[in-house]
């Protein structure tokens, strides 16, 4: 994304648009900006042989005002119109009159984080060209952000959209490029949002410790630059980490909601309200009916379909799992059987509404979970389609969510005779979370709510069923002595060979083994060799932020035998955040 402020930059703007297919123009009066947009669009359209489509946000607002719509709904109408055009065929799309403050808005955790974020989401998978005109008419084009900084915000928006879809795999490369762009521009606010999204991505992938460290760091940086909405988002994500471990923290979510409200962030307050309600929904006597209705109203006010979809999903889930008690009086003399039937029909309606909204918002993660819960809670719906499980597995597989596929397997297989969770779940989720797994009398699983918040990968070295601990072996232990590595600053890594109680080395000194270190990415590591018996220590110097892989090979120099090889993954954040408590690198592969 580029910001171009002078009409004399027409040639540069055309080249930028042809290269990136996205251009944002601001900092000039409306008439000049519109003429500039038309000139760029006309030249590109003539060269590419494409039609030009024009939309003005103000026009949509006037039309929608007659129907009583909010400004957010007017913007949503523009996005939907653009989405329809982009889907049909490639074109040159001009959207002018984007209000000040929304063209470069920070992604706030949902695909609808700003009007520009929505436009990018609608445009991202097409072959069209997108030109956006911002009404932010600041004096002097020199005050506009640089191209590199603008690129950083666009990359952050795209990364946030991938996380919203439930596909965090695609977010990592975008975040690395965004960090580089913000560092070049010296944009500390952009770097803070990049660190936050890194933490959010780690939470989605089930890497709780990495997520906690990065989210604490992001909150500190938000405070340093006075970014109150970001501080509230970081607090909310930290509270959701507690929920994912099986110990919900409603008080922390309530505090995040208050902070969003003080900052005037209505969308953030709506999300914090939702997760607070979800955290308390299973409490006896909690008025969840009223709270879910309030949250749905909040999301409607800010035209956030994704938030509305998750609200309907959890509302339906609560209806399907309760006996009707919701902290308010029951339905008079209605019999229990009638009330159960009404709840089931209402839950079906809400599941169907959530499914439609997830499809509109292009969120396969939410769609797969809603399909699964709808099938489990509504046998009639499930039996209409004999391939229901295969269809849901296919959606989970499309975003690389093996954990989601494992829950489908569990739903098909039913409870195990010994009451233990299957290996594919036990190796991914905390024991405290799996302890909350329940079963209905019909043998259907009551999947913990927090299971759908993450897509955890298997933990390395997790014992398979039937494996017995081997106390006669030895393993490699890696310890990161300087926590939170940053680019171009050496970080120390200690390597130890730890023999088991039954190993001969447990009662004798270690032999003079050699540990060889290799970087598998953009980083240096020295020395190349160390001796574990003497306390092997290596200096790891990354040259860019992101995830780095290192390989350590332990050999017996007397025989030339490779005894063990370990690969570790280390996250590098944008710049030096200050001292933190040391922690171990995350092993990702090991072979002997």
Image (cartoon, rainbow, N blue to C red):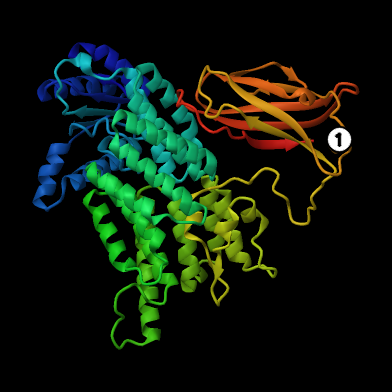
In the image, taking residue 74 as reference, residue 407 lies left or right, namely right
Vertical arrangement, residue 422 with respect to residue 286, above or below: above
**How dense is the environment of label 1, judged by Cα within 10 Å: few (below 14), some, or many (20 and up)?**
some
Which residue, as the protein is rendered here, is positioned at the far right? 559
The residue shown at (48%, 41%) is 212
Identify which residue, 537 or 246, lies in the foreground.
537
Secondary structure beneath label 1: helix
Rendered image quadrant of residue 42: top left
Q: In the picture shown, does residue 340 fall above or below 228?
A: below
User: Vertical placement of 321 versus 368: above or below?
Assistant: below
| Image-based side of 34 in relation to 330, left or right | left
Q: Position of residue 8 (x, y in %)?
A: 20, 11
Where on the picture, by quarter, is residue 445? bottom right
Q: Quadrant of the N terminus?
A: top left
Q: What residue does disc 1 label? A: 505
Q: Nearer the viewer, residue 237 or 126?
A: 237
Residue at x 51%, y 55% (from the top left corner): 451
Residue 127 in view here:
no
- Identity of the residue drawn at 26% across and 60% down: 294
Count of numbered labels shown in the rendering: 1
x%, y% of residue 372?
49, 61
Please tell me which residue is depicted at 63% across the width and 66% down the height of the picture.
Answer: 413
Residue 496 in percent (x, y) is at: 73, 30
Q: Is residue 353 visible to us here?
A: yes
Q: Is residue 19 left or right of residue 530?
A: left
Q: Position of residue 79 (x, y in %)?
A: 26, 41
Figure check: 464 above or below 484: below
Looking at the rendering, in which quadrant would you find the C terminus? top right
Q: Is residue 41 left or right of residue 166?
A: left
């Amino acid at each position: 994304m580029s910001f171009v402020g002078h009409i004399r930059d027409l040639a540069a703007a055309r080249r930028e648009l042809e290269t990136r297919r996205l251009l944002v123009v601001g900092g000039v009066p409306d008439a000049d900006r519109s003429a500039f947009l038309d000139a760029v669009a006309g030249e590109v359209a003539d060269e590419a042989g494409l039609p030009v489509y024009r939309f003005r946000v103000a026009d949509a607002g006037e039309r929608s005002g007659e129907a009583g719509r909010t400004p957010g709904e007017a913007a949503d109408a523009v996005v939907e119109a653009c989405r329809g055009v982009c889907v049909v065929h490639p074109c040159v799309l001009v959207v002018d009159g984007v209000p000040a403050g929304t063209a470069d808005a920070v992604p706030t955790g949902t695909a609808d984080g700003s009007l520009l974020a929505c436009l990018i989401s609608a445009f991202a998978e097409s072959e069209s060209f997108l030109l956006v005109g911002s009404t932010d008419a600041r004096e002097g084009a020199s005050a506009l952000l640089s191209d590199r900084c603008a690129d950083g915000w666009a990359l952050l928006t795209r990364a946030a959209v991938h996380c919203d879809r439930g596909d965090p795999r695609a977010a990592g490369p975008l975040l690395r490029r965004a960090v580089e762009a913000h560092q070049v521009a010296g944009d500390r606010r952009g770097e803070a949002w990049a660190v936050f999204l890194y933490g959010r991505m780690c939470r989605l992938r089930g890497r709780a410790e990495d997520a906690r460290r990065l989210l604490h760091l992001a909150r500190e940086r938000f405070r340093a630059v006075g970014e109150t909405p970001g501080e509230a988002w970081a607090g909310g994500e930290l509270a959701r980490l507690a929920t994912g471990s099986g110990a919900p923290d409603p008080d922390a979510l309530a505090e995040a909601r208050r902070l969003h409200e003080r900052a005037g962030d209505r969308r953030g307050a709506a999300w914090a309200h939702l997760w607070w309600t979800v955290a308390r929904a299973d409490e006896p006597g909690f008025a969840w009916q009223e709270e879910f209705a309030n949250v749905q109203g909040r999301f409607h006010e800010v035209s956030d379909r994704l938030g509305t979809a998750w609200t309907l999903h959890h509302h339906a889930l609560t209806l399907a799992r309760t006996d009707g008690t919701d902290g308010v009086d029951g339905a008079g003399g209605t019999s229990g059987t009638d009330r159960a039937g009404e709840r089931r029909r209402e839950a079906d309606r809400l599941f169907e509404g959530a499914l439609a909204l997830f499809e509109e918002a292009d969120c396969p993660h939410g769609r797969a979970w809603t399909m699964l819960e709808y099938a489990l809670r509504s046998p009639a719906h499930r039996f209409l389609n004999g391939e229901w499980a295969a269809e849901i597995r296919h959606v989970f597989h499309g975003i690389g969510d093996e954990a989601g596929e494992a829950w489908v397997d569990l739903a098909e297989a039913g409870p195990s005779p010994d009451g233990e969770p299957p290996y594919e779940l036990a190796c991914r989720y905390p024991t405290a979370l799996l302890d909350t797994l329940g079963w209905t009398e019909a043998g259907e699983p009551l999947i913990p709510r927090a299971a759908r918040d993450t897509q955890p990968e298997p933990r390395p070295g997790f014992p398979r069923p039937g494996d017995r601990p081997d106390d006669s072996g030895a393993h490699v232990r890696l310890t990161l002595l300087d926590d939170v590595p940053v680019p171009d600053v050496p970080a120390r890594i200690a390597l130890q060979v730890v023999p088991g109680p039954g190993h001969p080395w447990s009662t004798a000194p270690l032999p003079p083994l050699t540990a060889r270190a290799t970087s598998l990415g953009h980083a240096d590591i020295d020395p190349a060799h160390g001796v574990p018996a003497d306390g092997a220590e290596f200096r790891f110097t990354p040259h860019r932020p992101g995830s780095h892989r290192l390989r350590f090979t332990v050999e017996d120099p007397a025989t030339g035998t490779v005894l063990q090889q370990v690969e570790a993954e280390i996250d590098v954040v944008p710049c030096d955040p200050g001292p933190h408590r040391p922690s171990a690198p995350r092993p990702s592969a090991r072979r002997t």
